Amino acid sequence: MTGRPARSTVPAVDVPSGRPAEVPTPAPGDARLTRLSLNQKTTERWSVAEAVAGCVRAGLPAIGLWREPVRQIGVPAAARLVADAGLRVSSLCRGGFLTAADPVLRRRALDDNRRAVDEAAELAAACLVMVVGGLPEGSRDLAGARHRMAEGIAELVPYAAERGVRLALEPMHPIFCADRGVLSTLGQALDLAERFPAERVGVVVDTFHVWWDPDVLGQIDRARGRIAGFQVCDWITPLPPDALLSRGMMGDGHIDFPLLRRAVERAGYTGDVEVEIFNADVWAADPDDVVSTLARRYVTHVLPD
Amino acid sequence: MTGRPARSTVPAVDVPSGRPAEVPTPAPGDARLTRLSLNQKTTERWSVAEAVAGCVRAGLPAIGLWREPVRQIGVPAAARLVADAGLRVSSLCRGGFLTAADPVLRRRALDDNRRAVDEAAELAAACLVMVVGGLPEGSRDLAGARHRMAEGIAELVPYAAERGVRLALEPMHPIFCADRGVLSTLGQALDLAERFPAERVGVVVDTFHVWWDPDVLGQIDRARGRIAGFQVCDWITPLPPDALLSRGMMGDGHIDFPLLRRAVERAGYTGDVEVEIFNADVWAADPDDVVSTLARRYVTHVLPD
């Protein structure tokens, strides 16, 4: 333990906002935590071992892992850590980046995705999150990039199926279309996913990426049986200077989380709710404070009906 | 004239990239300039009189005006300036901001929009561009904001019709959904526009806002008869720290302009092509250099088939 005062002795403060907590932090065992997962990117400075221990301290039953920190200790060690702690792996981030036109780069990307599938299988991850990639350097052929990305997914599906891994296509906010993800809407992700069996290819609904979509509720309904993951974080304004780090703690921005949570539940999703926040201020805060804040904000801003 | 060397004596340099010009600057009278319009926000430090003179010097036949600089000299003076110069007013920017829930703010917004309609009529603008507004302060009710925005448009249509002004709904990139425009896709804009006669309510196709949309070509086709304006500027990466100023000179980014230009032409649009760039580096450059660069880039990056 950290030697900090016990939670009950000082009023809790939310990070990174610095605002007083609105509710007590749910204690381990609290029924409201049953589906809450920490995506380890939210506590970026924590190793896998630290993030696993942090989840256990806070009573979170699941974790979303990233390949890079997993690789630092090796996949078998990471798998053992989460299994010993009794955590579910709600997702492994990430495969994808399948838009290269160059055959060598394309082959390399497919090879790397097969390794990601293997890792997801060994970690017993509920899904492998696919961030499909942006436009290749110097290219303006968006339709071509989208076509190659779809072909790449099709090539990976049999390999993933053999290993029991579900690919989860993640539509990304159009702010990332050029440099990160040419899959821009949930509808577009479903158009692609529906070419394959639902248990093989699903979609990730990430509130940050889809909240603005005029058709989001209709597409979530359409996604019945395809929702492989549900991620939450907020859209904050003004946008921080680094757009990649523009995500906020739930409640600090503009997203109506209960609306989207109810929609994914109506569509039959019963899996974990993963908190994934890329934000320099969140990363600068004490990771235990981040976890307790996100547990409180989950209770106050995501769960209410 | 400015006393700078004549254009032909030194190799031209594009701004803000600093790259050598790929082609000579089209001279006034060049047939390729027949539909090119300068949105005056692109040369932000120029007054209306300076922007009008700049268009004349460069041989541009049209200008997109903004209400704030117009107000500095008064609408009649601005109308006289453009008429005397023989320029078309391809658009007036902007009306909108119709999402307020507070009745006083709502009334104020509608009054201001009626003034904008009057100004557009007096300036003989081809359309009044409508930026509909974001979420009201502290609100997360996106559906409500969209509903009020649509009601506001409906309330303005008869007033604009009496004055012969066409409202042009501008779908905005989802990056601006929270704070600027809850109209996020061309499809959503058309859903609203189609409630009214096409000559009364059209849409603006701005490449920056729509290029990422997987359905953009289908929606442009659907917009036949409704395209009130076509604006061009590029999506550049990395995104500058101020997202509002993240637009680039055509050719400096990722957008396939001929693809979108051909689509709006197939949909019957024969109006002006307005260059509208919000960008700190563009604004820091000599405005005459900005205009000659955009004329060159229009020829090399927008017009080719």
Image: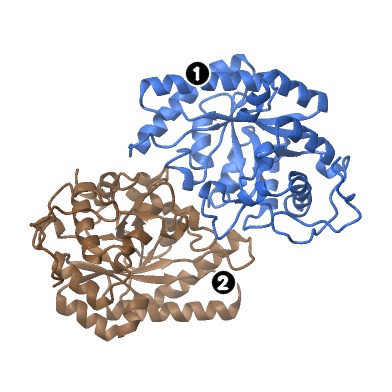
Chain colours: A brown, B blue
Label 2: few (<14), some (14–19) or many (≥20) C-alpha neighbours in 10 Å: many
Residue displayed at 51% across by 60% down = A182
Determine whether the residue tagged by mark 1 lies in a helix, strand or loop.
helix
With A258 as the anchor, is A240 left or right in this view? right
Above or below residue A133? Residue A268 is above
Residue A163 visible in the current orientation: no
The residue carrying mark 2 is A100
Image-quadrant location for residue B220: top right
Label 1: few (<14), some (14–19) or many (≥20) C-alpha neighbours in 10 Å: few
- Position of the N terminus of chain B, as image quadrant, is top right
Asked whether the residues under marks 2 and 1 belong to the same chain, the reply is: no
Q: Chain of mark 1?
A: B
The residue carrying mark 1 is B111
Residue displayed at 61% across by 29% down = B68
Q: Are marks 2 and 1 in contact (CB under 8 Å)?
A: no
Determine whether the residue tagged by mark 2 lies in a helix, strand or loop.
loop
Tell me which amino acid carries mark 1.
Asp
Residue displayed at 21% across by 82% down = A80
Q: Report the number of numbered marks.
A: 2
Image-quadrant location for residue A62: bottom left
Towards the viewer: A290 or B181: A290
With B191 as the anchor, is B60 left or right in this view? right
Task: Find residue B98 and name its label.
Answer: none
With A189 as the anchor, is B187 left or right in this view? right
Residue A94 in picture, x, y percent from top left = 39, 71
